[in-house]
Image (cartoon, rainbow, N blue to C red):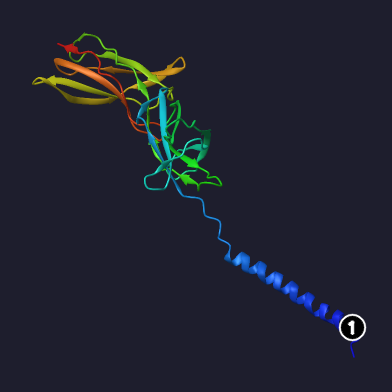
């Protein structure tokens, strides 16, 4: 017979009390509201101009907003600027840009650099504890070589060769078939394509030059312009028109 019933009751009550506390804790967790997920965001990218000429400034504009109606501009965030030689990547980090919140939020982010070759560009927002990440669309900014105006004589004789020359930037491989020369003839009050030939590319200091010996087969008024075909690095480049050559 248990001579200490009060001690026995305490021994029975303690486990029950622990169980009740544990159950209450589980119920509190179950009914506690889940932490709200950060809101989604959208990021867009656009080129201020494309194509651009080599060694001029290219400008990439981005816009970051929270996906609400109407969209809410997000300023003061860190935005990665990435580029690649193809739309499928691989993408390389160029830099990180941000902006300063003003009296009116804009969500606008800007990056610029000297254009050296054609790239695909995009902007990436890695996200924060307050906002989900976002990646912009890819933007191709074409870069065109700079071709100088062809230098030609004012007069020439039919079937007599003369030289057409001009500058080319950046430097191209000497001897490469990188520059075409387009001939145009004045006919019935309009300029019409007459012939296309290749020019020779050679070194000229830090850059290149193109030259071509041409012999116009007939009398008339002619002009010329140079162009570089499209490549992986560059879009089509085109020079201004030469002055008019009067051929007799």
Above or below, 190 relative to 234: above
Query: Left or right: 67 with respect to 161?
Result: right
Above or below, 32 relative to 128: below
Nearer to me, 10 or 103? 10
Q: Quadrant of residue 170?
A: top left
Nearer to me, 2 or 244? 2
Q: Quadrant of residue 142?
A: top left
In the picture, which quadrant includes the N terminus?
Answer: bottom right
Q: Which residue is mark 1?
A: 4
Residue under the image location 25 percent in, 15 percent down? 242
In percent of width and height, residue 47 lies at 38, 33
Query: Left or right: 43 with respect to 248?
Result: right
In percent of width and height, residue 210 lies at 35, 19
Task: Please say whether residue 233 is visible from this viewpoint.
Answer: no
Nearer to me, 3 or 75? 3
Residue under the image location 20 percent in, 13 percent down? 244
Residue under the image location 17 percent in, 14 percent down? 158
**In the structure shown, which secondary structural element does the residue marked by tag 1 occupy?**
loop
In percent of width and height, residue 58 lies at 41, 27
């Amino acid at each position: 017979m248990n001579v200490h019933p009060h001690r026995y009751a305490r021994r029975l009550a303690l486990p029950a009390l622990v169980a009740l506390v544990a159950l209450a804790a589980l119920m509190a967790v179950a009914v506690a509201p889940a932490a709200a997920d950060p809101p989604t965001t959208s990021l867009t990218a656009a080129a201020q101009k494309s194509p651009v000429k080599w060694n001029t400034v290219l400008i990439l504009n981005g816009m970051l907003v929270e996906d609400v109606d109407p969209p809410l501009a997000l300023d003061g965030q860190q935005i990665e600027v990435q580029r690649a030689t193809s739309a499928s990547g691989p993408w390389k980090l160029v830099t990180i840009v941000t902006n300063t919140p003003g009296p009116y939020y804009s969500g606008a982010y800007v990056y610029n650099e000297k254009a050296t070759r054609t790239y695909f560009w995009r902007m990436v927002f890695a996200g924060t504890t307050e906002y989900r990440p976002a990646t912009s669309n890819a933007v191709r900014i074409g870069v065109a070589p700079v071709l100088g105006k062809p230098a030609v004589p004012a007069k020439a004789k039919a079937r007599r060769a003369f030289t057409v020359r001009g500058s080319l930037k950046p430097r191209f491989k000497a001897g490469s078939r990188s520059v075409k020369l387009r001939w145009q003839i004045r006919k019935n009050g309009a300029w019409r394509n007459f012939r296309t030939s290749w020019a020779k590319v050679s070194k000229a200091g830090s850059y290149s030059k193109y030259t071509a010996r041409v012999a116009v087969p007939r009398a008339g008024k002619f002009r010329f312009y140079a162009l570089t075909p499209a490549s992986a690095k560059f879009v089509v480049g085109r020079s201004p028109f030469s002055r008019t050559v009067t051929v007799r």
